[in-house]
Amino acid sequence: MNRNHPRRFALASTAIMLAGLGGCVVGNNSKLQRPTIGQELIDLQKARDSGAIDETEYDRTRTRILDGAGVSSRPAAEA
């Protein structure tokens, strides 16, 4: 029986794990991108439709998103 098998396995496992973490530890120059306004609204509607948030929270957050984008949150008929 090969006695080096556990040692090789441990060494290989460690190498694979460190290679996977390399991007996290070594200079990752990518910038976090904020989702688009459209994506935020889609996600918000999904949260409302799934019951994660109620209608009041949906309206409040939708208004905040649109106001932050400089868009009127009122329907065109009211504007």
Image: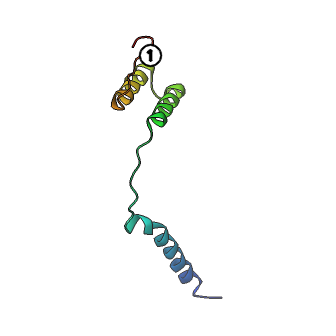
Residue 61 at what x, y percent from top left? 38, 27
**Side of 11 relative to 65 (left or right):** right
| Looking at the image, residue 32 lies above or below residue 27 | above
Q: Quadrant of residue 5?
A: bottom right
What's the residue at 53%, 74% (across, down)? 13
Q: How is the image coloured?
A: rainbow
Q: Position of residue 12 (x, y in %)?
A: 54, 78
Outermost residue toward the right in this view: 1
Quadrant where the N terminus sits is bottom right
Which residue is nearer to you in this view: 17 or 34?
34
In this figure, which residue is indicated by the disc labeled 1?
Answer: 75
What secondary structure is marked by label 1?
Answer: loop
Q: Nearer the viewer, residue 66 or 59?
A: 66
Q: Residues within 10 Å of mark 1 (few under 14, many from 20)?
A: few
Count of marks overlaid on the render: 1
| Residue at the extreme top | 78
- Please say if 21 is above or below 50: below
Tell me what residue is drawn at x 49 percent, y 30 percent. Answer: 47
Query: How far across and down, in percent of the image, does residue 69 sit?
Result: 36, 32
Q: Quadrant of the C terminus?
A: top left
Q: Nearer the viewer, residue 31 or 25?
A: 31
Name the residue located 56 percent from the left edge and 78 percent from the top edge.
9
Q: Quadrant of residue 54?
A: top left
- Would you place residue 22 above or below residue 62 in this image? below
Q: Position of residue 16 (x, y in %)?
A: 52, 72
Q: Amino acid at mark 1?
A: Pro
